[in-house]
Image (cartoon, grey):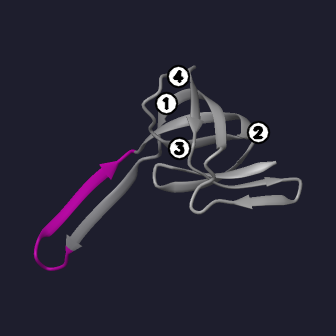
Amino acid sequence: MYAVVQTGGKQYRVKSGDTLEVERLAVEAGQPVSFDQVLLVSDEGKVTVGSPTIPQAVVVGDVLEHIRGPKLIAFKMRRREGYHRKVGHRQELTVVKIKEIKVS
């Protein structure tokens, strides 16, 4: 059984036991979190597609930790004008372990 959930403007295909990194959630480490924007559920070949979401489906997981992603460098330069700019960015992420997919 797997599901497609949407969080942080991105879509993730998850199944029970998966660990994924999503955009920072306002939930403390060790606490449960539920994703109610479930777009698709597949249960042994029986596929349910929402329009746009499935109202009775919920994906439940536990927040393991909050981390920061890898550092990305944005560099701008205009040749022969002496202009250059270097900016670094690290995205705030939350590590979530999926416990179960509920469809009522």
Looking at the figure, which quarter contains the C terminus? Answer: top right
Mainly helix, strand or loop, the magenta region? strand
| Image depth: mark 4 or mark 1 in front | 4
Mark closer to the chain start, 2 or 4: 2
Rendered image: mark on residue 52: none
Mark closer to the chain start, 3 or 2: 2
Give the image location of residue 41, x and y in percent.
Answer: 73, 53
The kind of residue on which mark 3 rests is Val
The kind of residue on which mark 1 rests is His
Q: CA distance from mark 2 to mark 1?
A: 20 Å
Give the image location of residue 39, x and y in percent.
Answer: 62, 56
- Residue position for label 1: 66
Give the image location of residue 48, x and y in percent.
Answer: 74, 58
Is 45 located above or below residue 77 in the figure?
above
Answer whether labels 4 and 3 touch (C-beta < 8 Å): no
Q: Is 85 in the magenta?
A: yes
Mark closer to the chain start, 4 or 3: 3
The kind of residue on which mark 2 rests is Ser
The kind of residue on which mark 4 rests is Ala
| Image depth: mark 2 or mark 1 in front | 2
- Residue position for label 3: 22
Q: Nearer the viewer, residue 104 or 37?
A: 104
**Magenta stretch in the rendered image:** 78-90
- Residue position for label 2: 16
